[in-house]
Amino acid sequence: MGTTSSWPIRSITLGAALTAIISISNTVQATETIQLTAVDGYPPKSMWVKEFINFFIPEIDRRLAKTGNYKIKWNQAWSGQITKKKKVLQGIQKGLGDIGVVTTVFHADRVPLQMIAYATPFVTNDPGLVARTVDDLVKKYPAFKQAWKKYNQVYLTNLAVFDSYQIFSKEKISSFADFKGKKINGAGMNLRYLQGLGAAGVGGSSVKYYNNMKTGVVDGAMLWAEGAVTFKLPEVAPHMLRANIGSANSKAVTMNADTWARLPEEVKTVISEAAISYRDHVSRIASEKSAEAYANFEKMGGMIHPMNQSDREKWANTMPSVGSDWAMSLEKKGLPGKAILSSYMEAMRTAEQPIIRQWDKE
């Protein structure tokens, strides 16, 4: 009697165990591994690369782990291992990298709409506001994504990685007049800011500014405080002119379009949503580190010289019509430059930013 009654219990227990084992086996088998190569020409000490490694990748992995359907095996290639700083766009276009951070300021000819904040200096020092506003424009104007499509890429988001451009120099520059005869490193459109100052703009990238000043190629560079500290500029350029020229969206996160097309919808959704979280995270880091960076600049032996408001206004109003020139150049290509410029400036006015020059009203 006891033996007969115990048999069903053992049978059910064994059946349940087998079901659990099969279920676990099916779950394991269902997890698909996707290989992705992430690229940038800048080193991991660069803030946005560091946060790509420490925040963006783990955030994607964490979200995918919720279902367990997919996981990504990451190949990380930084510091020019696959693509140099100015060639990331081309590298992702060719499929040398699947996903990466493109420094858009080097590609004003290819993705000109990404230059909106560079076309509007002395407008805002809020990187988060810049980044969110640009992505709002991307949603409103299809031309933004269409530009990337030409280069076999899918646009995910933009990054504003600093609070404001400042001027770092070997000799003290504290006023508008001190620029005369100086050679200043810059990148892309911000070289136009120097026109009207009596200074000569010299193109370059932040990783080369140190050696350029050390060897006398230039007298100064346009950079942000966190970048200056990271690249140890106080050693060769101990003077900072704190002019608060403004923040800008200097980066874009993109994916190779062929890679993107092969991804399951769940993975696409996770990467897209994590990219926005990464954008906002980088903006917060940029804001949080700015105050610390100014203090660290002084700790490293640097001296900060605030530019008075009248000189800032004189500088802004002496510049060429950077904003309207940019918008008109786009209109000639059949792109809605004027509308985009107006939308951007209206967003800044709504946010009550300290605008010196109304670039869309010229």
Image (spheres, helix red, strand yellow):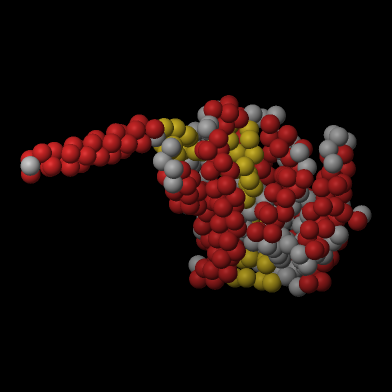
In depth, the one of 68 and 141 nearer the eye is: 68
Q: Position of residue 92 (x, y in %)?
A: 57, 32
In depth, the one of 71 and 186 nearer the eye is: 71
- Residue 149 located left or right of residue 235: right
- Residue 190 located left or right of residue 61: right
**The C terminus - image quarter:** bottom right
In depth, the one of 312 and 262 nearer the eye is: 262
In depth, the one of 111 and 61 nearer the eye is: 61
Q: Name the residue: 60% across, 39% down.
A: 254
> In the picture, residue 348 is in which quadrant?
bottom right
Residue 208 seen in the current view: no
> In the picture, residue 246 is in which quadrant?
bottom right
In the rendered image, the vertical position of residue 309 relative to residue 157, given as above or below: below
Q: Position of residue 339 (x, y in %)?
A: 86, 47
Q: Position of residue 85 (x, y in %)?
A: 57, 40
In the rendered image, the vertical position of residue 288 relative to residue 199, given as above or below: below
Residue 124 seen in the current view: yes
Single out the residue that lies furthest toward the front: 1
**The N terminus - image quarter:** top left
Single out the residue that lies furthest toward the right: 362
- Residue 317 located left or right of residue 222: right
Q: Name the residue: 80% across, 63% down.
A: 350
Q: Position of residue 189 (x, y in %)?
A: 74, 47
Q: How many marks?
A: 0
Q: Name the residue: 44% across, 37% down.
A: 70
Q: Name the residue: 70% across, 29% down.
A: 150
